[in-house]
């Protein structure tokens, strides 16, 4: 078998000699596979999609799987060999990934022996159940990734006791009930991303970052962002980046200061919440204010030079299109955002569920993290378009004075408080080298910690599970090198969760202890409702 690449997109920009080499390698490998298949010695592929016994029990199916994987390998080599600029190569690679993942023989009834066997054994009931699952997802407008009937926010998710002590059009502020008699006088404010619900930090008791922080003796406050809906009539769809920083982050800081009666707080931001928090603190600094004694940034981008696979969506045309559509008002919908992020890893987050839910007729297992992932939020159009242009497209946030918020020029280098920067080694949304780049922007003493796994699983890694690892510089080596590769070479690996390391760091910036407050809120900020509040329960439509 030979393979003709001349009609493939991008073939015209591949050197003929390189293309001939790719084609020759393909033919040679194909001949080897077919020979092994004839001799009955062909081994199952290592790809988990084809690792089940049904594939290896049928030589024709196993050979088809090998042929598919060989074709994918050759397509990727073609992309690598293309004489194009890096941005074009990234787009080609992304397009090839989407095409190849969609065309896997595992995704089709006639070419998936597992599906065929279940169909036969169930006398067609598996496909009938799958069709019911498909119709249910059509009604929901999204792919089901977990058994959603097993979860309810406030019942078995986001259950850490606390109370809402402030709310406005942008957020509710939750103050959590202390878990120990003596607490740090300086409170901790957590700012999660407004692109998702806050309870990623408070899933269930056994993996709640909020509960862990409480157990370590910190007073914890947390921002629960409002989920704007198309039916809202109070102007939230016209909210800007400036609005979210002034009426959101800085307002939350002021309320925490007032309730705790502390001039400074400890501040933590996660993902986009970290970008917003750092920008808001730089805005405060420009006004002569220093409300934060320490800053923790978890998988956060401040320097958008390298944004990984998301680069394929970033260009001037996309920015202008969004600005025309929603730049003056309207919503960037949760459905579109969720679909975009799912197709960053299509095999794991899309086609895996298409096969299991629709073709095999199974119900996905209950998984709290995937329930949270499906509970995403809408974003006001003006907020989103400002963020997209000034960060991902033009990367102006890292430039001193490159952007202004409410008339204040933003200079991240003015932030000189101690900072704890965390990145995840396999993060495809915030590449760890980009998280590390924040250490070169902030001017205060900075610790960098590199955890294992991805954007979410790396962060939500409770110590009791004794899973994964993290890397830090050896004790006594405080100076961070400019290069992330140099940092990695000098760092040392430690088993388990990074949470205790962060807690010990934060304790250094919370030296004074007080008796734990007996009641949440204050005379000027009375309790509004129990945690987790009502804002988090509003689902996008």
Image (cartoon, rainbow, N blue to C red):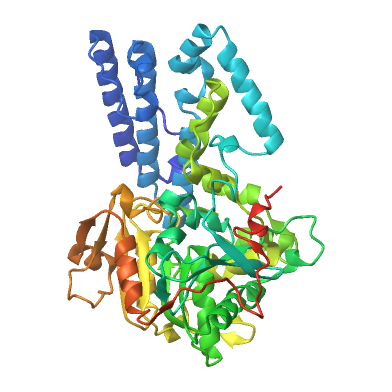
Relative to 137, is 323 above or below? below
Q: Quadrant of the N terminus?
A: top left
- In the rendered view, does 158 fall on the left or right side of 10? right
Task: Mark yes or no: residue 388 visible.
Answer: no
Q: Residue lying at the far bottom in this picture: please name it.
A: 288
The picture places residue 13, in percent across and down from the top left corner, at 43, 46
Q: Is residue 279 visible?
A: yes
**Considering depth in this image, is 286 or 328 the residue closer to the camera?**
286
Question: Taking 163 as reference, is 23 above or below it?
Answer: above
- Between 159 and 412, the one lying in front of the other is 159
Q: Nearer the viewer, residue 147 or 400?
A: 147
Residue 499: x and y in percent read: 34, 61
Q: Position of residue 182 (x, y in %)?
A: 40, 73
Vertical order, 154 against 492 (above or below): above
Q: Where is residue 125 drawn, in percent x and y?
A: 59, 12
Q: Is residue 280 above or below residue 81?
A: below
User: Closest to the observer: 36 or 430?
Assistant: 430
Residue 284 occupies which quadrant of the picture? bottom right
Q: Residue at x 68, y 33 (%)?
A: 138
């Amino acid at each position: 078998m030979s393979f003709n690449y001349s009609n493939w997109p991008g073939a015209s920009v591949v050197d003929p000699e390189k293309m001939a080499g790719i084609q020759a390698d393909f033919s040679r490998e194909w001949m080897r596979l077919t020979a092994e298949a004839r001799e009955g010695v062909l081994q199952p592929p290592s790809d988990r999609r084809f690792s089940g016994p049904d594939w290896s029990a049928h030589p024709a199916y196993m050979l088809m799987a090998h042929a598919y994987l060989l074709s994918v390998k050759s397509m990727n080599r073609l992309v690598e060999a293309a004489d194009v600029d890096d941005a074009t190569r990234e787009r080609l690679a992304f397009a090839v990934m989407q095409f190849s993942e969609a065309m896997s023989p595992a995704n089709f009834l006639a070419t998936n022996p597992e599906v065929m066997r279940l169909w036969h054994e169930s006398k067609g009931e598996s496909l009938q159940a799958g069709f019911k699952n498909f119709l249910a997802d059509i009604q929901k407008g999204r792919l089901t990734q977990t058994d959603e009937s097993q979860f309810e926010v406030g019942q078995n998710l986001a259950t850490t006791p606390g109370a809402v002590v402030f709310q406005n059009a942008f957020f509710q502020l939750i103050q959590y009930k202390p878990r120990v008699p003596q607490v740090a006088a300086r409170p901790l404010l957590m700012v999660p991303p407004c692109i998702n619900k806050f309870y990623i930090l408070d899933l269930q008791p056994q993996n709640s970052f909020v509960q862990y922080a409480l157990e370590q003796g910190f007073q914890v406050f947390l921002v629960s962002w409002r989920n704007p809906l198309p039916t809202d009539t109070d102007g939230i769809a016209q909210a800007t980046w400036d609005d979210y920083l002034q009426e959101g982050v800085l307002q939350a800081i002021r309320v925490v200061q007032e309730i705790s009666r502390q001039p400074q707080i400890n501040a933590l931001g996660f993902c986009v919440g970290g970008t917003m928090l750092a920008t808001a603190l730089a805005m405060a600094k420009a006004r002569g204010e220093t409300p934060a004694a320490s800053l923790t940034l978890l998988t956060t981008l401040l320097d958008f030079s390298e944004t990984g696979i998301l680069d394929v969506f970033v260009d001037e045309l996309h920015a202008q299109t969004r600005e025309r559509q929603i730049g003056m008002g309207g919503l960037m919908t949760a459905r579109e955002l969720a679909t975009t992020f799912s197709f960053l890893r299509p095999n794991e987050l899309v086609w895996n569920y298409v096969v299991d839910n629709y073709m095999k007729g199974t119900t996905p297992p209950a998984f709290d993290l995937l329930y949270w992932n499906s509970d995403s939020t809408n974003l006001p159009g003006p907020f989103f378009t400002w963020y997209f242009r000034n960060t991902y497209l033009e990367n102006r946030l890292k430039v001193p004075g490159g952007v202004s918020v409410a008339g204040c020029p933003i200079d991240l280098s003015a932030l000189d408080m101690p900072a704890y920067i965390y990145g995840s080694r396999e993060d495809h949304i915030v590449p760890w080298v980009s998280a590390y780049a924040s250490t070169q922007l902030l001017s205060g003493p900075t610790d960098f910690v590199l955890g294992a796994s991805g954007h979410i699983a790396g962060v939500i890694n409770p110590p009791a599970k004794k899973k994964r690892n993290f890397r830090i510089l050896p004790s006594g080596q405080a100076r961070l090198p400019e290069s992330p590769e140099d940092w990695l070479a000098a760092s040392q690996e430690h088993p388990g969760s990074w949470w205790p390391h962060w807690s010990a760091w934060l304790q250094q910036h919370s030296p004074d202890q007080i008796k734990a407050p007996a009641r949440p809120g204050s005379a000027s900020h009375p309790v509004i409702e129990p945690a987790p509040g009502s804002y988090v329960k509003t689902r996008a439509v």
